[in-house]
Amino acid sequence: MNKYVLIALGAMVMASCSNSSNNNKAKQQLEEVSVSQIVEDINSIPAPNSLELMDMINKSGAAYLLDATNSIENIENYLSTKSKALNLGVYAADLCYNVAYNKQAEVELYLKNLLVIVSDLNISINAEKISDSFKDNSSDFATLSKLTTDMLEESQYILNQTDQTEIALMFLIGSWVETASVCLSVVENSQNPAAAMDMVKNHFDYIDNIIKYLDLKKESSEFADFIESFASIKVKYEAFKADSSNADATAALTEEVANLRSSII
């Protein structure tokens, strides 16, 4: 399974995997997918995975944007389990963005936030070991990838054993939305607009999977708003996909994502 670099639990749902077996899982009919499968199946997002996507953004010539990520200070606002789980995903995406641009100081700050939220959610990983490993290898992209791959496997095991599928789904939503926001910002800033459009499409093509998972939770008030928001994003994305050169379609999609992101962060 092709996994992307993130921290511990962060890696678990933010990432995308590209091998054929996982892609087959993603194609299962809704009635065949149980809630208990979410933790495993959310790793079936089509390639490129989130870290690869952020690295592609960097290599596309898009400048690093200071305001593209969620503020570190906002962590103080997340008091409920729902807001913590959502923003665990958001900060995981932000970590990937900063790792891709080799922003070592920012990587340390986002890593710290991730570990705080992981602790708050009672996910039992070795935070001290993770922190030390990142510090020791902060400039080594390949080593960070291997370290986090190992942590991903541990995190998947923990979530499966403790049946925290709702937290996993909240995290998926947060990470997807934040990555979508960054991707759309690239459309306006990239020196290679065509490549930027491909990045957006690679990421947004997973939206049908998220809608399937949300449909499993349609009786839960915690997910009601997301069902409506993702349905609206899908409509805007289909218009964008049909004519990605249409500025109005791009603006409409960007606004829809921005509105959902604002409700999360």
Image (cartoon, helix red, strand yellow):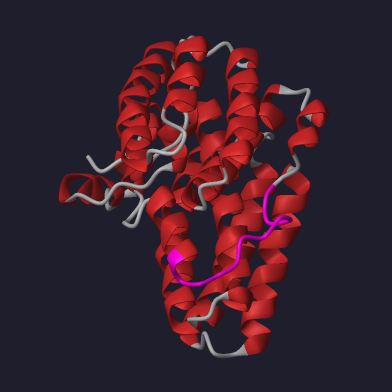
Residue positioned 31% across, 46% down in the render: 44
Range of magenta residues: 59-69
Q: Position of residue 50 (x, y in %)?
A: 43, 50
Quadrant in which the N terminus appears: top left
Q: In the visual, does 215 lie left or right of 106?
A: left
Main secondary structure type of the part rendered in magenta: loop
Horizontal arrangement in the rendering, residue 134 relative to residue 94 (left or right): left
Q: Is residue 179 visible?
A: yes
- Res 78 → quadrant: top right
Instruction: Name the image quarter holding residue 48.
Output: bottom left
> Image height check: is 15 above or below 246?
above
Horizontal arrangement in the rendering, residue 222 relative to residue 30 (left or right): right
Could you tell me if residue 85 is visible in this image?
A: no
* Closest to the observer, 102 or 112: 102
- Residue occupying the point 71% across, 45% down: 70
Seen at 78% across and 23% down, the residue is: 79
Q: Nearer the viewer, residue 129 or 81?
A: 129
